[in-house]
Image (cartoon, rainbow, N blue to C red):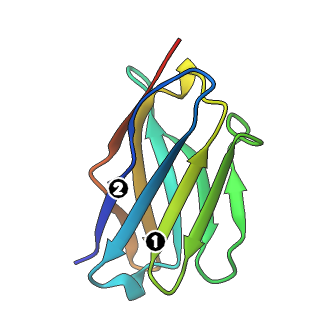
Amino acid sequence: QVRLVESGGGLVPAGGSLRLSCAASGGIFKIDSMEWVRQPPGNEREMVASISLEDGLPNYSDSVKGRVTISGDSARYTVHLQMNSLKPEDTAVYYCVGRGPWGSYWGQGTQVTVSS
């Protein structure tokens, strides 16, 4: 059973920074990419950033490009999301997602709140 645990969320003023982390365990051989998905209050989920654990190539949504950096450690199956210049519209629950050939695995989510 794959388990993903996020950490690092919290309350931050606009313009501030946060670093989210996610650690995968249990059946991690099933994961070949990891990503962060967020769900703002009252809105649908959207992909923020993803990274391949095979080649380390990142991918970003247009809404965060230039402000966010995703990094991963394929040996430890961990992924981090460094978020800078945060805006109130970045307020959301952020989920870590592991994806592989047998399916997708979600963490419990961590709340990020950006005050104006």
Residue 90 rendering spot, x and y as whole percentages: 54, 28
Residue at mark 1: 78
Label 1: how many residues lie within 10 Å, few (<14), some (14-19) or many (20+)? some
The image quadrant of residue 86 is: top right
Q: Viewed as shown, does residue 24 lie left or right of 80?
A: left
* Circle 2: element type: strand
| Residue at the farthest top position | 116
Residue 104 rendering spot, x and y as whole percentages: 39, 66
Residue at mark 2: 6
Label 2: how many residues lie within 10 Å, few (<14), some (14-19) or many (20+)? many
Please tell me which residue is depicted at 46% across the width and 51% down the height of the picture.
20
On screen, 56 above or below 64? below
Residue 28 rendering spot, x and y as whole percentages: 37, 83
Residue 99 rendering spot, x and y as whole percentages: 46, 69
Please tell me which residue is depicted at 73% across the width and 38% down the height of the picture.
62
Q: Viewed as shown, does residue 94 lie left or right of 56?
A: left
Label drawn at residue 26: none
Of the pair 38 and 113, the residue shown nearer to us: 113
Q: Earlier in the sequence, mark 1 or mark 2?
A: 2
Q: Tell me how far mark 1 sits from mark 2, CA to CA.
A: 10 Å
Amino acid type at mark 2: Glu
Q: Viewed as shown, does residue 55 lie left or right of 3?
A: right
The image quadrant of residue 94 is: top left
On screen, 94 above or below 1? above
Of the pair 2 and 81, the residue shown nearer to us: 81
Please tell me which residue is depicted at 35% across the width and 53% down the height of the picture.
7
Amino acid type at mark 1: Thr
On screen, 102 above or below 45? below
Please tell me which residue is depicted at 56% across the width and 46% down the height of the picture.
47
* Circle 1: element type: strand
